[in-house]
Image (cartoon, rainbow, N blue to C red):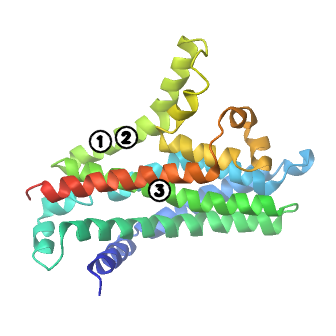
Amino acid sequence: MNPVRILAGKEFRDALRNRWVVSATLLLAGLAFALAFLGSAPTGGVGANPLAVTVVSLASLTIFLLPLIALMLAYDALVGERERGTLLLLLTYPVTKSQVLLGKFLGHVGVLALATLVGYGAAGLAVGLLGSGADSQSWRAFGALLGSSVLLGGVFIALAYLISALVRERGTAAGVAIGVWLLFVVLYDMGLLGILVATKGQIHENVFPWLLLANPADIYRLFNLTTFENIRTFSGLAGLSGQVHFSPGFLLAALLAWMVLPLLGAVFVFKRREL
């Protein structure tokens, strides 16, 4: 059997034993149900589509929560095994360092994908089927939300692997992972806002959209909150979508690049690091 598939299965089973899958699924499902039903409760009075409002709420939740879960899931994937001495033992088997890293990465992505699809999927189906007015565009937006959420989780798992390959102690990896989360989820957008205020909005209109591509969380936000017309209306990003002209396919390709490049960096560092 392919070593990558074996290692991915082992990582997934370890996550099941450690209750990571159950914990992440329950957390995402609990928050998704709360946002879905509390957030869509008043929509009947204003004629809003409950499923569209749920997509906006879940997209906002995902930007903060999913990157943190992904980083905490995988920050010690390599450095933790190295500290425990199990990495040397694993490499005595006929398997390369690249296969080890890719197998563990796919296992972690599988864990996050299962938690996201079950947690968000149950809440979305409940709102869409029990509520009224869920049109085909809202269902497509919800499907896009699920797929892009898994991709965003893959981005931050890849960043966690790069961190884990670069540092020598688990404590350092945990600290850097929290710093990466703060940078992309909180500080980057505050920095952009500060630049806009300092320059009185004089950033050239051709430059600003490309600055958003430097942050995977902003790419995710643009994809989910500006692609579909009914979502744009509720998210309040109709004005931004008029200035940013990236196609949905281009935004997904940008997110994919954000996942592949750190993963290649992790492979490069891991193959050259002495254990």
Residue 30 locus on image (x, y percent): 60, 60
Mark 2 → mark 1, Cα distance in angstroms: 6 Å
Q: Mark 3 points at which residue?
A: 153
- State which tag comes first along the sequence, 3 or 1: 3
Using the image, determine if residue 134 lies above or below residue 186.
below
Dots 2 and 1: beta carbons under 8 Å? yes
- State which tag comes first along the sequence, 3 or 2: 3
Residue 147 locus on image (x, y percent): 58, 62
Identify which residue, 76 or 150, lies in the foreground: 150
Residue density around tag 2, few if under 14, some if 14–19, many if 20 or more, within 10 Å: many
Give the position of the N terminus as an image quadrant: bottom left
SS at mark 2 in the image: helix
The residue at the point 46 percent across, 50 percent down is 67
Q: Which amino acid does label 3 sit on?
A: Gly
The residue at the point 47 percent across, 69 percent down is 22
Identify which residue, 251 or 81, lies in the foreground: 251
Asked where in the image residue 81 lies, by quadrant, the reply is: bottom left
SS at mark 3 in the image: helix
The residue at the point 50 percent across, 58 percent down is 151
The residue at the point 88 percent across, 60 percent down is 133
Hey, which residue is sitting farthest bottom in the picture?
A: 1
Identify which residue, 148 or 31, lies in the foreground: 148
User: Does residue 32 appear to the left or right of 153 in the view shown?
Assistant: right
3 vs 1, front mark: 3
Residue 126 locus on image (x, y percent): 74, 67
Mark 3 → mark 1, Cα distance in angstroms: 17 Å
Q: Mark 1 points at which residue?
A: 176
Q: What residue type is labelled 1?
A: Val
Q: Mark 2 points at which residue?
A: 180
Give the position of the C terminus as an image quadrant: bottom left
